[in-house]
Image (cartoon, rainbow, N blue to C red):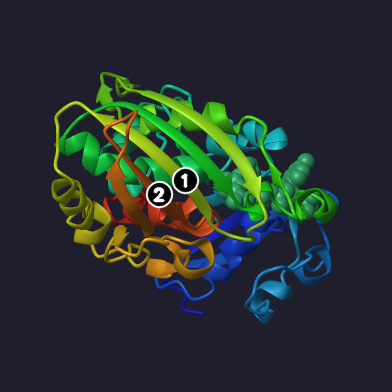
């Protein structure tokens, strides 16, 4: 592997998001996986022995042979992707930041710290400026949002910018992989829908407000709109589907809304970042679209598929969106944040 690539480490490398990081980074043009870390249960074992590999592509020899390390801030890689369980992520990530590492995290723990950006690269790249205000010395923490909140924020961004949004109602149908591995027991989820995912509705109602907000002084002023969410776990492996109703501040024709979605591009596309999909939002005309099995891998799993835009008898419009929860919603979205930070010079001090 080229020594010119940037060395990175993955914390929580044995979990389902950690595995997706390994799969997605295996051939990345800028980053290489230098170190893998997980809990004491896995540490000191070969990665192939510590992990229950559930990705569709085979585990590559280079990762398989690595010895899993403890999540201690003595790693050689200064850029650290965190896929840690939220029960332990908070302190471990802070320790790394204080020790001079850049942590880009999937865990919820620091998402609402005033000085920690919560980034969807196409929506709020400017919020990265917050890292300059952090109190971790040389290190920093940047967070990737909740997987369902990412898809929703991307769909709302062009509407928020062009027409303004008053209120949103969203009902999700979320994939099993969103709960990590092994996740919900098969006897609970097969032939079933579970109308509760702990903490998920709160994240869906709050995170888009920070993501769509504006930096004012040393924090983000939240966007002024109301979101009501109901979250369900369904028997789908990957891909979260969301049925959304929206009230706009300015009336808009259906064609104007679709135009705003399909013309939406942002800094990742302009900078031609490796993980940036050419079309962050893809509008599908078919009456029965989007569907997880057919459309979750559009744009390499980084595009949000939207369809069924129509008038609503309660709100102005309703539509359906789909986004890949472990690619755009976790590892892929986090890698795109790292690419954006590299392109904008935020990684220079760690190299
Ligand atoms: P997971 O499959 O349960 O994996 C958790 C990882 O954390 C494992 O590598 C585990 O290592 C490690 N870990 C647990 N306790 C630890 C400790 N005391 N010290 C060090 N490492 C420890 O979870 P996941 O689904 O990959 O999710 C990881 C994070 O991403 C979570 O915060 C989750 O909320 C977030 N997230 C997940 C998704 C998704 O679609 N799954 C989407 C967005 C965000 P061992 O194997 O050694 O126990």
Secondary structure under badge 1? strand
Tell me the residue at 78%/55% (across/down): 182
Decide which of tag 2 and tag 1 comes sooner along the chain.
1
Tell me the residue at 68%/47% (across/down): 179
x then y, percent, for residue 64? 72, 74
Q: Nearer the viewer, residue 262 or 195?
A: 195
Tell me the residue at 22%/43% (across/down): 158
x then y, percent, for residue 259? 16, 53
Residue at the front extreme?
Answer: 313
Q: Height in image: 290 above or below 63?
A: above
What residue is pinned by disc 1?
A: 242
Residue count near mark 2 (Cα–Cα under 10 Å), binned few <14, some 14–19, many ≥20: many
What residue is pinned by disc 2?
A: 320
Q: Is residue 193 left or right of residue 257?
A: right
Q: Height in image: 208 above or below 77?
A: above
| Mark 2 Cβ and ligand 1 under 8 Å apart | no
Find residue 149 and name its label.
none
* Residue 83 in sight in this render: no
Tell me the residue at 26%/38% (across/down): 126
Name the image quarter holding the C terminus.
bottom left
Secondary structure under badge 2? strand
x then y, percent, for residue 110? 53, 30
- Calculate the distance from the C-alpha at mark 2 to the C-alpha at mark 1: 6 Å
Q: Nearer the viewer, residue 230 or 302?
A: 230
Residues at discs 2 and 1 in contact (Cβ within 8 Å): yes
Q: Nearer the viewer, residue 121 or 81?
A: 121
Residue count near mark 1 (Cα–Cα under 10 Å), binned few <14, some 14–19, many ≥20: many
| Mark 1 Cβ and ligand 1 under 8 Å apart | no
Q: Nearer the viewer, residue 192 or 242?
A: 192
Q: Height in image: 301 above or below 90?
A: below
């Amino acid at each position: 592997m080229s020594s010119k690539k940037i060395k990175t480490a993955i914390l929580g490398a044995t979990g389902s998001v950690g595995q997706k990081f390994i799969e997605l980074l295996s051939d990345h043009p800028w980053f290489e996986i230098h170190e893998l870390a997980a809990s004491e249960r896995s540490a000191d074992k070969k990665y192939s022995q510590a992990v229950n590999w559930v990705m569709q592509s085979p585990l590559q020899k280079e990762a398989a042979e690595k010895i899993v390390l403890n999540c201690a801030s003595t790693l050689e890689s200064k850029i650290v992707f965190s896929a840690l369980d939220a029960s332990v992520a908070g302190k471990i990530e802070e320790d790394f930041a204080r020790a001079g590492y850049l942590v880009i995290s999937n865990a919820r723990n620091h998402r609402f710290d005033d000085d920690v950006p919560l980034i969807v690269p196409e929506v709020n790249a400017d919020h990265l400026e917050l890292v300059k205000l952090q109190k971790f010395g040389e290190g920093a923490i940047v967070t990737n949002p909740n997987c369902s909140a990412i898809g929703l924020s991307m769909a709302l961004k062009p509407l928020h910018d062009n027409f303004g949004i008053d209120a949103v109602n969203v009902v999700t149908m979320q994939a099993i992989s969103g709960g990590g591995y092994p996740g919900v027991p098969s006897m609970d989820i097969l032939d079933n829908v579970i109308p509760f995912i702990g903490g998920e509705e709160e994240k869906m109602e709050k995170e888009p407000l920070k993501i769509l907000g504006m930096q004012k002084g040393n924090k983000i002023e939240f966007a002024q709109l109301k979101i009501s969410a109901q979250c369900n776990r369904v028997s789908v492996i990957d891909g979260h589907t969301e049925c959304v109703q929206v009230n706009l501040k300015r009336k808009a024709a259906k064609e104007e809304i679709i135009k705003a979605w399909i013309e939406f591009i942002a800094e990742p596309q302009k900078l031609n970042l490796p993980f940036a999909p050419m079309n962050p939002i893809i509008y599908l005309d078919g009456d029965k679209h989007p569907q997880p099995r057919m459309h979750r891998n559009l744009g390499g799993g980084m595009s949000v598929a939207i369809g069924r835009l129509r008038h609503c008898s309660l709100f102005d419009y309703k539509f359906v969106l789909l986004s890949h929860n472990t690619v755009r919603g976790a590892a892929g979205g986090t890698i795109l944040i790292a690419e954006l930070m590299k392109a904008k010079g935020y990684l220079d001090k760690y190299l």
